[in-house]
Image (cartoon, rainbow, N blue to C red):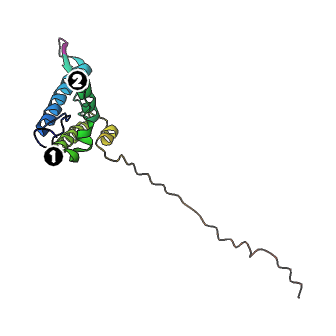
Amino acid sequence: MAKNGNIHPTRIFKTPQELLNAWQEYKKDVDEEASKWSKVQYVGRDGERVTDNPPMPYDLDGFFAWYLNKYGQYIHQYLKQPESYGDDFLSTVTHIKAERDNNIKTGVLTGHFNASMGNRIVGLADKQETSTTANVKLLNINPLGDVETNDSTS
């Protein structure tokens, strides 16, 4: 058992604030990465060069990969099973997921992100309703009514 009680000695984040700080750092790096995808436009009479960085989505898979690449540790267990780390971590993970969902929903609503992919990322069903109408005509034919009867008793 660790000196400070029930915290496992190999735990990556000792407090929920450390996890939240990592998330904030990830978001900052993602926002800086937007410059790789910038649109270049030439505007005005003199053709002044203007770059426009697109908004970037915050994604949990991206967060996991970013942390592994930067710090060499896997952190998916914190977000996949937050209840096993206590109520404080559960609250922090809920906040992270809500912030991620808000980012993606806003990007979809403003037309910056693909709606279908955004719905899948945040776990919403991408349902499409299709309805089919068919006109069926029923013929009023009695197949036994046209048959001649051979009654040998007459």
| Alpha-carbon span between mark 2 and mark 1 | 25 Å
Residue 69 against residue 77 in the figure, above or below = above
Q: Which mark is residue 142?
A: none
Q: Which residue is mark 1?
A: 91
Q: Magenta stretch mostly in which secondary structure?
A: loop
From the viewer's side, name the closer residue of 15 and 58. Answer: 15
Indicate the position of residue 77 as horizontal and vertical percent values: 26, 39
**Mark 2 or mark 1: which comes first in sequence?**
2
Residue at 31%, 35% in the rendered image: 114
- The residue that disc 2 covers is 70
Quarter of the picture containing the N terminus is: top left
Report the span colored magenta.
45-49
Residue 46 horizontal side relative to residue 131, left or right? left
Element on which disc 1 rests: helix
Residue 51: x %, y % from top left = 20, 18
Q: Is residue 47 magenta?
A: yes
